[in-house]
Image: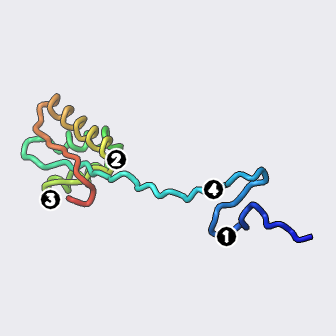
Amino acid sequence: MASLPSSRPPDSPAGPQHDEGGGVVLERAPSRVQPPPMYQVVMLNDDYTPMEFVVVVLQEFFGKDQATATQIMQKIHFEGKGICGVYSRDVATTKAAQVQDAARQAGHPLQCVAEPAGSG
């Protein structure tokens, strides 16, 4: 008696695999999710905002210690701008707005912006 060909195709290494119940088991290819673009918060120099205020803002809103805040403040003062931190877009724009609100409440014209990281 001749054997009948199987109704199931043979499993190929590149094809779908079959489970014990006869169903097809597909392997999920790992998807590559791009990380969100990062934004840097940049503080701009002006001739009116006190240096001490800038140091306090860097400590309060960006969690910098006294020495790091002073270094960033000096960079802002001597180079015209300084990066306060790098965050996702929403966090960066929120921090920039918080800094500007605090400066306005204190009567200072301090400018702070969020821009794509690496563009400054």
Label 2 residue SS: strand
Quadrant of the frame with the N terminus: bottom right
Q: Position of residue 106 (x, y in %)?
A: 16, 30
Task: Using residue 20 as the reference point, say whether residue 98 is left or right of it.
Answer: left
Res. 95 visible in picture: yes
Res. 56 visible in picture: no
The image quadrant of residue 117 is bottom left
Q: Earlier in the sequence, mark 4 or mark 1?
A: 1
Residue type marked 1: Pro
Along the line of sight, which residue is nearer the eye, 22 or 73? 22
Residue placed farthest to the top in the image? Answer: 105
Label 4 residue SS: loop
Residue type marked 4: Leu
In space, the residues marked 4 and 1 are separated at their CA atoms by 12 Å
Residue occupied by mark 3? 79
- Check the image and report above or below for 93 versus 36: above
Residue placed farthest to the front in the image? Answer: 1
In space, the residues marked 3 and 4 are separated at their CA atoms by 57 Å
Residue type marked 3: Glu
Residue occupied by mark 1? 13
